[in-house]
Amino acid sequence: MKKTITLVVALGLSACGAFAAATAFDTAANYVNVWSTTPANLGSGFGAWSISANNNLLPPYAGTYLDQTSYNNSGSVLDAGYSWGTYANGTGPSGELGSLNMVRPFMTGGGTSSLLNQTFSVGIGSGGVGGASSSLSINIGTAFSLSYAGGGPDNMTLSVDGGAANPLAVNFANLGAGLKIALTVTGPLNSLSEGYSLEFSPFFGGPTILTVNGTFDSSSFNTSSFTFVDYNTSNNGYVNDLSITNVPEPSSMVLLGLSGLTTLLAIRRRK
């Protein structure tokens, strides 16, 4: 009996592992000594970085760097000792505000550009946002925008399909400690009501903070890129571990279960 249980569990892990294989992955630790506003396209499965510093006054008040310290809470998303850091805290003589935009397109092919039956995840953290004209935001394509703004209610907000920004039960304590944000898209592709699931959890592991399920208009809005925006924050922002993984389709899970059951019955008959 012990051999039967071991065989069935091994089959299940093997199949699930295949579904969870990363189709795209990159981490800040890949960029030691080579990070800049025009970095190399490292990692795998993503398009090239596009990074722009706006209202970058002299001395520079908006930019990016490779962080490896615990300065201003950067340790919230360190992986292998590094994270991508951002800063944008300058005000020009006419009141211009600094901002830093980091964009990474998803590659086409295999459904990656649409995230169909895939999960995109990223780690983000913050050392402090600041007043009413300050925010940290991430956009996934044109369909999803997540933002934490300063000077108001202590909630992250979510906008879907360019609609109203609705508050979420995710606060600065969660952001400051390091958040892992994961978006799964389930289909039907190119429809008015494509399904999605958005999960927030601690970057270093722990119970899920919040899961949001809903639909979006994938015929008009896309999920084909990642953007991180640091807008006039009082302290630094942090990003790490961009990943796209496949997830099992329901039909595949049913087949997997039937396969395991058939194997178990066959072994029992032989005994």
Image: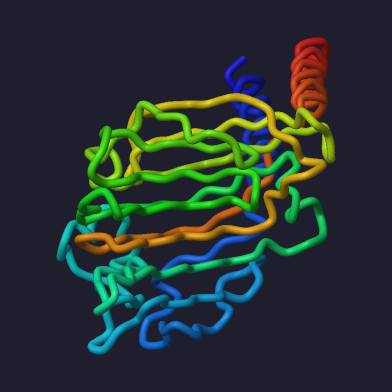
Residue at screen point 58% across, 66% down: 104
- Identify whether 266 is placed above or below 172: above
Rendering quarter of residue 204: top left
Q: Nearer the viewer, residue 55 or 168?
A: 55
Can you give x and y, in whole percent of width and height, for residue 202 in the image?
A: 34, 39
Disc count in the image? 0
Residue at screen point 25% across, 73% down: 90
- Identify whether 248 is placed above or below 20: above
Q: Nearer the viewer, residue 260 or 268?
A: 260
Residue at screen point 32% across, 46% down: 149
Quadrant into which the N terminus falls? top right
Left or right: residue 54 versus residue 107 is left
Q: How is the image coloured?
A: rainbow
- Identify whether 1 is placed above or below 88: above
Quadrant into which the C terminus falls? top right
Left or right: residue 52 versus residue 22 is left
Can you give x and y, in whole percent of width and height, for residue 14 in the image?
A: 67, 39
Rendering quarter of residue 25: bottom right
Can you give x and y, in whole percent of width and height, for residue 206 in the image?
A: 33, 33
Residue at screen point 26% across, 53% down: 76
Q: Residue furthest left?
A: 71
Rendering quarter of residue 200: top left
Q: Nearer the viewer, residue 11 or 128?
A: 128
Can you give x and y, in whole percent of width and height, for residue 31 in the image?
A: 43, 79
